[in-house]
Image: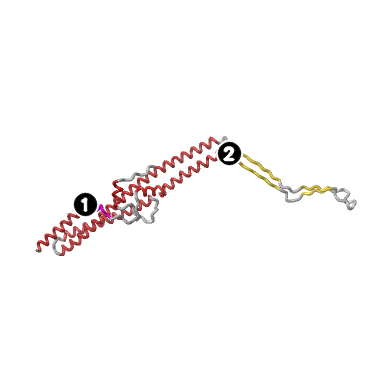
């Protein structure tokens, strides 16, 4: 009876070792979708093109050149100036024509008095200036700014294409890291269960202690891989968040559930052409 128990225990342990030796990717495909926010690749590219800070600066440079072109073009148009001057005397002016015999014969006043009425005076003037000799120089200035604008536009297109490639690369890297992390976590669960069972068999002197140490070594290695993948995934999400213009307050805003990952990896969405 004891030999049968030892034989069945060894068969169970061998089956567990065989199970752990096989790849876990085949039976880890059906995973419960994450409850975090879902973000598709097209949405990530769209958010990056809208909110990336470097692209915003490039667009501002292009718009600045457009405004400068419009400003220089106004120099070719005629300029009109209007002037108006209104004045009025504030003091009344009177001139008396004196009588030379006023001091000789009393009661005789001046002959008459001159007075100027206080009336407003207005002067209006208009001036129209048309730059003729400066037209060629203005045209050269416009062409120079246009060349600068075209250069900024080409730089903007290049940055957009580079941003789309970086978003794709980081996005698929996150998907790969999530898939690998799920597989490693399943390995950790299996190794922990195997560690528990092996520990019981060691107490029963069914297996050797070296077998238990081997299981613990594999468990520690799997836990280290899970920690390394977790750190790598956090870094990749931070990179994606930066590419998206840091619109998320935390990098834990996920990209896709693993069920949707299979759809994305088989039917890769085309990048938006720029």
Which residue is more in the foreground, 156 or 27?
27
Quarter-of-image position of residue 205: bottom left
The prevailing secondary structure element of the residues shown in magenta is loop
> Residue 36 colored magenta?
no
Q: Residue at x 42, y 41 (%)?
A: 154
Q: Furthest residue to the bottom?
A: 203
Which residue is more in the foreground, 172 or 46?
46
For mark 2, what is the residue?
78
Residue range in magenta is: 24-31
Q: Quadrant of the C terminus?
A: top left
Q: Residues within 10 Å of mark 1 (few under 14, many from 20)?
A: few
Kindly indicate whether the residue at mark 1 contacts the one at mark 2 (C-beta within 8 angstroms): no
Q: Position of residue 216 (x, y in %)?
A: 21, 59
Quarter-of-image position of residue 224: bottom left
Residue 85 lies left or right of residue 148; in this view the side is right
Residue 86 lies left or right of residue 178; in this view the side is right
The disc at residue 186 is none
Q: Residues within 10 Å of mark 2 (few under 14, many from 20)?
A: few
For mark 1, what is the residue?
23
């Amino acid at each position: 009876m004891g030999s049968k128990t030892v034989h069945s225990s060894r068969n169970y342990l061998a089956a567990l070792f065989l199970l752990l030796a096989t790849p876990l990717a085949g039976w880890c495909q059906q995973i419960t979708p994450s409850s975090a926010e879902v973000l598709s690749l097209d949405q990530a590219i769209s958010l990056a093109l809208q909110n990336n800070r470097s692209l915003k600066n490039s667009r501002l440079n292009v718009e600045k050149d457009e405004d400068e072109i419009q400003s220089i073009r106004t120099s070719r148009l005629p300029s009109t100036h209007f002037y108006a001057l209104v004045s009025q005397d504030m003091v009344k002016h009177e001139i008396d024509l004196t009588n030379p015999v006023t001091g000789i014969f009393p009661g005789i006043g001046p002959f008459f008095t001159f007075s100027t009425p206080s009336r407003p005076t207005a002067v209006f003037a208009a001036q129209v200036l048309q730059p003729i000799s400066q037209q060629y120089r203005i045209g050269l200035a416009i062409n120079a700014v246009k060349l600068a604008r075209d250069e900024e536009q080409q730089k903007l297109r290049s940055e957009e294409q580079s941003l789309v490639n970086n978003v794709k690369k980081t996005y698929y890297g996150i998907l790969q890291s999530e898939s690998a992390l799920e597989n490693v976590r399943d390995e950790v669960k299996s190794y922990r269960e195997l560690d528990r069972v092996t520990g019981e068999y060691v107490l029963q002197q069914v297996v050797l202690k070296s077998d238990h140490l081997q299981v613990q070594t594999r468990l520690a290695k799997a836990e280290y891989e899970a920690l390394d993948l977790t750190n790598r995934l956090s870094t990749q999400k931070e990179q994606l968040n930066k590419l998206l213009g840091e619109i998320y307050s935390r990098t834990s805003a996920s990209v896709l559930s693993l069920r949707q990952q299979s759809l994305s990896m088989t039917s890769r969405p085309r990048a938006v052409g720029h």
